[in-house]
Image (spheres, grey):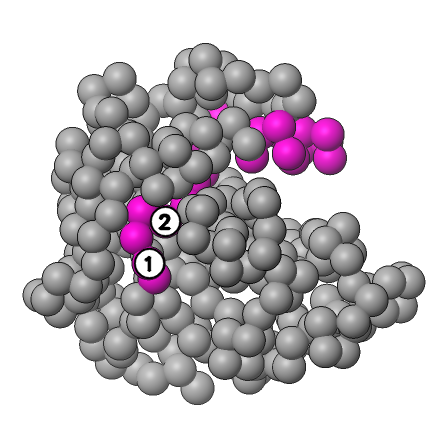
Amino acid sequence: MDAHALHEAATSLMSAYETRKPIEPLVTSYPEATVEDAYRIQQHVVRHWVEGGDVVRGHKVGLASAAMQRQMGVDQPDYGHLTGTMFHLEHQPIPSGRFLQPRIEPEVAFVLGSALRGPGVTVADAVRAVDFVLPALEIVDSRIRDWRIALVDTIADNASSGGVVLGSRPTALGDVDLRLAGCLLHADGELAATGAGGAVLGSPINALVWLANTVGPLGVTLEPGHVVLPGSMTRAIPVRPGGTVVATIAGLGSVTAVFSEEEAR
């Protein structure tokens, strides 16, 4: 894609955020777009947010499970940015109307105590850099109509990021085996999905290593205090306005997201 097409695609995504009206898949409008183009579009959108006063507070890893990679026809994850305005308080109503087509999924959130900069980051480096972990719920959303996304679409759309709810009980990484940690996801009191940490690249820590080594050559450092979401432990479920979703992760406790009655506009 040339510079004009990249700018045009980024502008259409930014318009979808502002108008709350989804757009057609980018791969339809720009069939020549590559994964590299998609990341450039993502960076353009994030730069626009930062220039408007938002702050990058971390990153998310998507497509971390083998099932999702098979579905998308890829052999590695993707990543997006987490900004300050994406974080919501546990148990406090989240405005449903700020999202277009929200879904929600449970994750382990890494909170970094020291910087990670690839390439060459090992599991030992990643473990040493983690200050603590929290149970988390990620709200995924798509600015692409009806979630008709290809890999280029989701990457350009900031890896389909929407929002984050963090639990409030920190746990030391050494106090839990994230590979074996089971997860129960309840929606409005009903069990909606189950999973375990091993679904995330064998262990969520592997997703942290992948992220550091992927963004490092691009000049990006995972900074102290940054939150990293390594990928979902279960399938994503739809968000209902007025609904309540609770994720319980063995060894980490629970985290609750409450949504307002307001419908998406």
Q: Give the left or right position of residue 192, taking residue 19 as reference.
A: left
Residue 2 vs 65, above or below: the answer is below
- Circle 1 SS class: loop
The answer to whether 261 is drawn above or below residue 180 in the figure is below
Q: Do the numbered discs 2 and 1 sit on residues whose CB atoms are within 8 Å?
A: yes
Query: Does 73 appear in magenta?
Result: no
Disc 2 to disc 1, how far (Cα)? 7 Å
Q: Which residue is drawn at the image coordinates 19% and 63% (left, top)? A: 192
Q: Is residue 240 left or right of residue 216?
A: left
225 is within the stretch colored magenta: yes
Screen quadrant of the N terminus:
bottom right
Residue shown at 66%/22% (left/top)? Answer: 119
Mark 1 residue type: Arg
Q: Report helix, strand or loop for mark 2.
A: loop
Whether residue 188 is visible: yes
Tell me where residue 170 sits by quadrant.
Answer: top left
Left-right relation of 201 to 222: left
Q: Which residues are magenta?
A: 211-236
Q: Residues within 10 Å of mark 2 (few under 14, many from 20)?
A: many
Where residue 110 sits in the image (x, y, percent)? 38, 33
Q: Quadrant of residue 15?
A: bottom right
- According to the picture, the residue beneath numbered tag 2 turns out to be 232
Query: Residue at the spot x=23%, y=31% of the render?
Result: 180
The percent coordinates of residue 63 (x first, y second) are: 49, 50
Residue type at mark 2 is Ser
Question: According to the image, label 1 marks what residue?
Answer: 235
Q: Quadrant of the C terminus?
A: bottom left
